[in-house]
């Protein structure tokens, strides 16, 4: 038996054998892969040849098995978390981080990159190759390649500690989210709750040991997982229970053994110290050194211009909610609290637009939504998506596998879809990641292409009591969003993995395709292709569609202000906040809330302790990217509006152009050049404001 069959993580390439991988494989596999890669790196450093074939290709060959295996481990940490896997991941993370630093701080490699740039060969390289080398030079400099002695040692200590703190933050949040539950047993406790939530809550109660739980008689288990939490907050008529659940949600990971507050303090302190070592005035400046936005001022100017457009609208939204609650005789109208917002928003939406979010669910069964989504992809991008279940091992029985083909039938990519919430082992939210990057290579004298494979992960309502997964409209939009990310990874035509798909794309441009795809949820042709009743097959009634359109910008000022609150808070913490100074991170949040919220956070609100994007993910000093890219995506979608959404030929032509630029070019060109190649000009903020109902 070979080593590879004994330990599946030693494969180092290809589709991960998820049906074979166990937590006990992690330490021995990573130890062996790191040892081999380190030996190969030492040899390469001793014999660097300043050419693409002599430096870039061998470096990719020696690092890929390590990063492939570690990518699989981190993917499983997100979708199949367990104490055993955590222990293995935590044991090896320092070694993987050290290896990454060894590569990025290698002076022989750094000098080799610069030598290529200064050689006669430079002009012969493609723009993609040049961008990869330029990025490698910049990344080396930002990773401390120029540091020496004790300064370098300290920098590396910081990197190791930050990696561990990020993992700890995410684990604490996952543990705290799944630790709390509310078990309801009385009819008055479930007043107002929709049947879909009652069925789901009864199923959760059975999974927790209540064998006789039924949707009709209970008991019902409500959790802090979004498919449970949000519908409860929207529909429960028990204000006291909404308050209890809300307070549990906003205080997650803020006390006890899973307290993230000291982790936040430490992360911000270390990031500031690290930035100073590299010669930056703040971590925000360090972060922006590799992004599309030219400066912190540019980011804050955009955010402030949008805040100015949305704050008054959000104030009007809140006043309207209070007036509506008062008109319904609700005593809370004069004592309006955060746990009232979702409930009264939903009631007001129902009253104003005759639109009940739960009424829509039967029209959005997952299979039908996928059929409509794939039909749209064929209509505008000319691709065909078909099931390929059974062709790749999966990590859970609910995971699907799909093939993406051109219209001539030739496969160009694949993707996994993990759609349902599993709070016991899967982190919240939704995301796209890559399993395999596109790459052209030569084998036996023939040029071949390694096809890209993506992971699409959501946390939507699971099937309950024999019914399919019936999605709410937000879940539909989320699926479209992640599919947009997946399209950029899968439809790339770049032949170098370092710039294929989302690789080497500036972070604040990465959200363009994902947010672009969300717009299609409101397109008539698209919506009617995916909205059909799961029992009767009847299409969504026309009146429902008109109500959806009318309600699209309901509370849009509040929604935009919420995102701006997060973005400005992120920048403030990473640019002006002084660790150990007069203000705590919470003080900063409360100060900014005065101009970025219209319903102030409660004194005990510990939102930062669950702000995984910036403390457990890759959005530190980059959360603004959602708004930065939304300017691009709204303007990109307006090209389709200008072409005429009912004009199939024009839509197809515009879609193919979007595919050949935004989706195809990946990180081979600067995002502004890619955008201009599609749009013919630089982006404009007007379409974003118009789409949000904040401008004519």
Image (cartoon, rainbow, N blue to C red):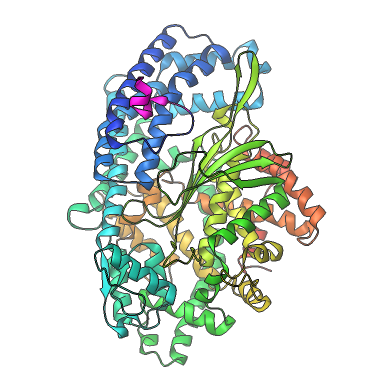
State whether residue 544 appears in this view. yes
Question: Is residue 229 placed above or below 94 in the rendered structure?
Answer: below
- For this rendering, which residue is in front, 376 or 52? 376
In which quadrant of the rendered image does the C terminus lie?
A: bottom right
Q: Is residue 158 above or below residue 569?
A: above
Residue 10 lies in the magenta-colored region: yes
Residue drawn at (53%, 51%) of the image: 482
Q: Specify start and end residues of the magenta stretch as a single range.
A: 1-13
**Residue at image x 33%, y 74%?**
214
Q: Is residue 425 left or right of residue 557?
A: left
Q: Give the percent coordinates (x, y) of residue 352.
A: 57, 83
Q: Indicate the quadrant where residue 477 lies.
A: bottom right
Q: Is residue 464 left or right of residue 172?
A: right
Q: Nearer the viewer, residue 581 or 340?
A: 340
Q: In this rendering, does residue 146 appear at all? A: no
Whether residue 301 is situated above or below residue 605 in the rendered picture: above
């Amino acid at each position: 038996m070979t080593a590879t069959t004994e330990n599946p993580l030693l494969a180092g390439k290809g589709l991960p054998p998820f049906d074979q991988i166990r937590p006990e494989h992690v330490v021995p596999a990573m130890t062996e892969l790191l040892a081999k890669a380190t030996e190969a790196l030492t040899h390469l450093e001793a014999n660097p040849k300043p050419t693409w074939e002599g430096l870039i290709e061998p470096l990719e060959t020696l690092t890929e098995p390590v990063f492939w295996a570690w990518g699989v481990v981190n993917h499983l940490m997100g979708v199949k978390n367990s104490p055993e896997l955590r222990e293995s991941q935590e044991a090896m993370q320092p070694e993987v981080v050290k290896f990454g630093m060894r590569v990025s701080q290698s002076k022989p490699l750094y000098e080799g990159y610069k030598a290529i740039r200064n050689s006669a060969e430079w002009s012969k390289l493609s723009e993609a190759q040049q961008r990869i080398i330029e990025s490698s030079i910049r990344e080396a400099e930002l990773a401390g390649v120029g540091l020496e002695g004790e300064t370098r040692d300290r920098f590396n200590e910081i990197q190791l500690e930050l990696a561990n703190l990020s993992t700890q933050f995410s684990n604490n949040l996952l543990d705290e989210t799944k630790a709390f539950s509310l078990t309801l047993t009385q009819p008055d406790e479930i007043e107002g709750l929709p049947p879909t939530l009652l069925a789901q809550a009864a199923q959760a109660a059975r999974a927790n040991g209540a064998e006789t739980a039924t949707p009709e008689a209970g008991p019902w288990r409500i959790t802090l997982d979004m498919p449970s939490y949000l519908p409860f907050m929207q529909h429960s008529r028990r204000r006291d229970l909404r308050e209890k659940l809300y307070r549990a949600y906003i205080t997650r990971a803020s006390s006890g053994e899973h307290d993230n507050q000291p982790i936040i303090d430490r992360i911000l302190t270390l990031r500031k110290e690290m930035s100073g070592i590299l010669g930056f005035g703040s971590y925000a400046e360090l972060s922006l050194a590799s992004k599309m936005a030219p400066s912190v001022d540019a980011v804050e100017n955009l955010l402030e211009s949008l805040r100015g457009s949305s704050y008054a609208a959000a104030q009007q939204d809140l006043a309207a909610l209070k007036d509506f609650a008062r008109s319904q005789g609700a005593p809370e109208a004069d004592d309006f609290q955060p746990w009232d917002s979702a409930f009264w928003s939903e009631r007001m939406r129902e009253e104003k637009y005759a639109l009940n979010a739960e009424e829509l669910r039967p029209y959005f069964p997952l299979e039908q939504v996928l059929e409509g989504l794939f039909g749209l992809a064929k209509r505008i991008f000319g691709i065909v998506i078909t099931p390929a279940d059974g062709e790749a091992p999966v990590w859970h029985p609910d995971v699907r596998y799909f093939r993406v083909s051109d219209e001539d039938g030739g496969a160009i990519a694949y993707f996994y879809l993990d759609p349902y919430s599993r709070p016991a082992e899967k982190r919240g939210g939704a995301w796209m990641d890559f399993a395999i990057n596109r790459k052209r290579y030569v084998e036996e004298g023939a040029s071949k292409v390694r096809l890209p494979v993506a992971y699409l992960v959501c946390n939507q309502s699971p099937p309950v009591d024999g019914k399919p997964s019936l999605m709410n409209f937000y879940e539909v939009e989320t699926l479209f969003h992640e599919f947009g990310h997946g399209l950029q990874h899968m439809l790339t035509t770049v032949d170098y993995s370092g710039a294929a798909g989302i690789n080497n794309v500036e972070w604040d441009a990465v959200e363009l395709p994902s947010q672009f795809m969300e717009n299609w949820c409101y397109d008539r042709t698209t919506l009617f292709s995916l909205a059909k009743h799961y029992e009767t097959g009847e299409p969504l009634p026309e009146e429902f569609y008109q109500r959806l359109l009318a309600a699209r910008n309901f509370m849009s000022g509040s929604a935009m202000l919420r995102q701006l609150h997060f973005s400005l808070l992120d920048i403030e913490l990473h640019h002006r906040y002084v660790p150990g100074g007069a203000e705590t991170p919470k003080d900063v949040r409360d100060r900014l809330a005065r101009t970025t919220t219209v319903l102030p956070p409660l004194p005990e609100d510990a939102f930062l302790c669950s702000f995984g994007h910036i403390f457990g993910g890759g959005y530190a000093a980059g959360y603004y990217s959602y708004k930065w890219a939304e300017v691009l995506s709204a303007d990109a979608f307006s090209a389709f509006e200008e072409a005429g959404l009912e004009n199939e030929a024009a839509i197809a032509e515009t879609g193919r152009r979007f595919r050949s630029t935004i989706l195809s070019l990946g990180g081979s060109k600067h995002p502004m050049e890619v955008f201009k190649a599609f749009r013919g000009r630089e982006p404009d903020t007007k379409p974003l404001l118009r789409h949000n109902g904040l401008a004519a």
